[in-house]
Amino acid sequence: MKKFTILLLALLLALPLTGCQGGQTGHSINVYNWGEYIDESIFDDFEAETGIHVNYKTFASNEMLYSAIKGGGNSYDVIIPSDYMVARMGEEGLLMELDYSKIPNAENIDPRYLNPAYDTEQKYSLPYMWGTTGIIYNTTMVDKAPTSWMDLFTTDLKGQVLIFDNPRDCIGLALKALGYSFNTTDKDQIAEATDLLIKQKEDGIVQAYVMDQIFDKMINNEAAMGTYYAGDYLTMVEENPDLAFVQPEEGSNLFVDAMCIPTCSKNYEDALAFINFMCRDDIVLRNCDETGYSCPSATALEEMDEEMATDPVAYPDEDILDKAETFGGLPEETLTFYDHEWIRICLAKVKY
């Protein structure tokens, strides 16, 4: 028995060691991204090339992402917040600086998307996708096509309108409808926008505040009009050709979502490898084709199918882009006031 035990131990010691987290090298990373926002088949390619397994999870809003990271208790290695949230998380010390010597494919990014206001020194982020917000509507359910953000508040489509379920986008579109900046810090203007949203809710115009739930509702003709992102509209219209999209005349939000490594990451080097992989032209093109979102890579855009590269929703004309405004970081006092006003919106009820 003793000889058998020694032999068994020797055999076990001879076996290759594998990590407890899976993957060919025993490595894995945790990636946290928006829903419907990646071609998940690329994870297999990444693992085949690097031996690093990807654990993938999605969030529905920047605020949900922020809470998950800020609250602690989570370990994510790559996250993809939007511009204004990159600024906030960078200022609060929640993001690691990127080592660009490990991200050679960063050279593919179009310079127009580098050193933006939300990360002026490009310390914490690399662009993932960009796009605009607007109004999606069902042409069979709407008598007159919307042209303005204000159409969301004056429509007679009771219970048929879907609105962003996050404070920055929601209050932002009301600010634009009133002629104000997305980035105002004027409390009176923010309160006026909140009042407009509360009246919209009390008048019974709003069916629901949604994020990814908008896909099923618009595809299945459960709502006539909704606010969302251009890339997601391109996904929805493939399922329901009765849908249409407009960037309102007051100007829409031009956003950039970016790849970052949070300070809670336990796999910094592997996270850098994943970001570099995601900047590779063939991977960028696959992601753009899958999601409908716009490409920040100059070299990938040159290789893109012409029909996709000239789509007016994904790549709008300069006159639309000139009127578009990017979300910037806001001071803590303004963010606190946003939270207060968001609670006022959530507590409002329909007046019968």
Image (cartoon, rainbow, N blue to C red):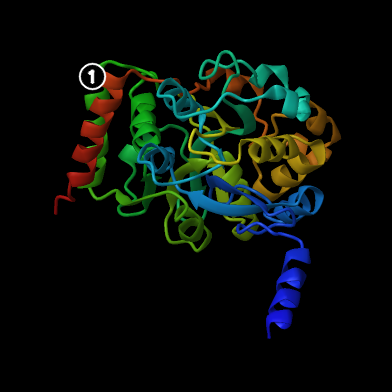
Q: Amino acid at mark 1?
A: Lys
Is 95 placed left or right of 290 in the picture? left
Determine the residue located farthest toward the front in the rendered image: 2
Question: What residue is rendered at 80% in x and 33% in y?
Answer: 300
Residue 76 appears at what percent x and percent y? 52, 44
Question: What residue is rendered at 53% in x and 33% in y?
Answer: 247
Quadrant position of the C terminus in the picture: bottom left
Determine the residue located farthest toward the right in the rendered image: 303
Above or below, comparing residue 97 to residue 261 in the picture: above
Instruction: Name the residue carrying label 1.
Output: 187
Question: What residue is rendered at 42% in x and 39% in y?
Answer: 69
Tell me if mark 1 has few (under 14), some (14-19) or many (20+) residues whose alpha carbon lies within 10 angstroms of its own: some
| Residue 192: quarter of image | top left
Quick one: 318 or 103, which is closer to the camera?
103
Quadrant position of the N terminus in the picture: bottom right
Residue 130 appears at what percent x and percent y? 61, 32
Question: What residue is rendered at 60% in x and 41% in y?
Answer: 267
| Residue 238: quarter of image | bottom right
Above or below, comparing residue 295 to residue 330 in the picture: below
| Residue 285: quarter of image | top right
Q: Secondary structure at mark 1?
A: helix
Quick one: 339 or 202, which is closer to the camera?
339
Residue 15 makes an appearance in the image: no
Residue 88 makes an appearance in the image: yes
Above or below, comparing residue 216 to residue 83 in the picture: below
Residue 195 appears at what percent x and percent y? 21, 32
